[in-house]
Image (spheres, rainbow, N blue to C red):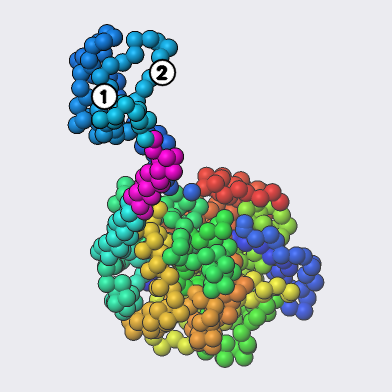
Amino acid sequence: MNDLPKNQSDDIAAFAGSYPKPDQGAKDAPQPETSAFAAGRSGIPANEQAPSPATGGTTQRQAENPSSPSYQTVGETPPAIDMGSAATAPFVVSAEVPSKLSSSPNTPEVGPSIPGGGDTVTPPVTPPGKTSGIWRRILTLLVLLVVIFGSGFAAFRFLGEFMSRNKPITLTYWGLWEDEQSLKPVIDAYKKSHPDVDIVYTKQSVRQYRERLQAAIDRGEGPDIFRFHATWVPMLKNQLAPAGNTGYTASEFTSTFYPAASKDLVIGGKVYGVPLMVEGLGLYYNEELFRAAGVTPPTSWNEFLEVAKTLTVKDETGKIITSGAALGTTNNVEHFSDIVALMMLQNGANLKNPITKEAQDALTFYRIFAEKPNNVWDETLDNSITAFASGRVAMIFAPSWQVFTIKQMNPNLKFQIIPVPQLPGTQVAWASYWAEGVAINSKNVDAAWEFLKFLSSKEQMTVLYTEQSKSRLFGEPYSRVDLAQTLINDPLVGAYIKQAPTAQSFFLSSRTFDNGINDRMIKYTEDGINSLAKGVSIEAVLETMSKGYSQVLSSYSVTPTAP
């Protein structure tokens, strides 16, 4: 799954207790101080208004035609009225015009004469009720037009959405560890219910992956879905799209996955990633060496120190032939930063600003395993994974996937994996895992999140684990709480499931190859441990580490916490 580097990355959290002194056994260890857990880590069209009938339906009376003749003087006969034009007037009069008009300005105007008689007739007036009836008909017509137009618009919109939903979609998916064949059954199952969605999975190289991923997304050429380490969220804050209506709600996420995932991936009430695994540190021990020495696997750090001393074999010159435990150095201890972070978390140290006594005790305890003359490990020994596979070290700390490396080196080696030792009164484990996210500039964010929710469902996660197990000893340990009982008694991955409820993470995760927040924090940790080996005081070492941590965290907008 991964190559074996000398150095790793780091992660940190906080806890309480006290570690045994170098030369004290379990019964001579000072009583731990009681302390509380340290504080955790720490984005309508306006409705159109129909024109008012009062303005839109009103017409103005036309002016007189300037070319028509004017009335003549008194005694002259006025020109006859063209009845054809009367159809356009508001009143229609069928009588003839009188032959003469009164010459007196005070003479009342009379109506036209009835043919054959001397009586006058007043033109009929349209009753007010008829006018209001006309307006009601106009308003009714306007309302009908609005209804027809609105219905047509809604139908057009619905049709557009329907066509859009059924338009073929291609989701690109960048993965890291899994081959395409492992995901094929899940992708095929999704396509059966979503025939318009095509998912193209590509396994990427881990080298410079984080940089390539961010650059591709920023250019608009990145994947829709991608794998990232949970501690990368501060680095990917401009590239991760939160889950929308098709993804997990914060409450749904919290009830589905373990606390570390909620702490790392739910920010401001929004979900930014989905874990498909739990991972961290387990205690590997060599069954044959334990049996030969008549010792039992340790559950506390006091027991661990005594067992390590018991299982260490040296020659007459003091050279280590068989080591009891791989701890104390940086150059040949795989995942040393994870181990140091775990110890500090358990002891209640504030890893964002590790200058307290809790941090001093934890770092000192890590270092004593390589301090002569009572050392159980040194820099001359092989890489810890190689040494364990060859039977030259009895105990190591490693994630579950190192099983594949060890079995490949020595298929016949008999070993077990148990939860990490604890301080009295504490239960803190280590979390370092990967998750799946969606690119913020994806054209299909909702479709991508819908697929991720399907992929992380109980049924499909089981299918994925089964498929992964066809090419190796086991798949990625389940990240869902409701699948815990399926693997909790497994001899190889059960320890990680048991520890998942109390696991914590920090920016000291090894082997993320991020060239960023983890690798930079690990470098300060490595320099600090190496300085201790050269005799620099623990106070000076932690002061330098703390300044380095603060600088790195601030560059990624992670606020260092005061002690």
Placement of 107 over or under 221, stated as above or below: above
Q: In what quadrant of the picture does the N terminus appear?
A: bottom left
Secondary element at tag 1: loop
Q: Residue at x 31, y 15 (%)?
A: 101
For the stretch drawn in magenta, the main secondary structure is helix
Q: Residue at x 79, y 68 (%)?
A: 34
Q: Can residue 207 be seen in this snapshot?
A: no
Instruction: Name which of mark 1 and mark 2 comes first in the sequence.
Output: 1
Q: Is residue 384 left or right of residue 31?
A: left
Q: Residue 137: within the magenta?
A: yes
Distance from the alpha carbon under mark 1 to that under mark 2: 16 Å
Q: Can residue 173 be seen in this snapshot?
A: yes
Task: Give coordinates of residue 228: x percent, y percent.
Answer: 42, 61
Q: Is residue 306 left or right of residue 469?
A: right
Q: Which residue is mark 2?
A: 108
Q: Which residue is mark 1?
A: 97
Relative depth, front residue between 399 and 376: 399
Q: Residue at x 32, y 78 (%)?
A: 189
Relative depth, front residue between 219 and 544: 219
Task: Give coordinates of residue 483: x percent, y percent.
Answer: 51, 82
Q: Which residues are magenta?
A: 125-147
Relative depth, front residue between 229 and 283: 229
On residue 106, the disc is: none
Extreme front residue here?
A: 117
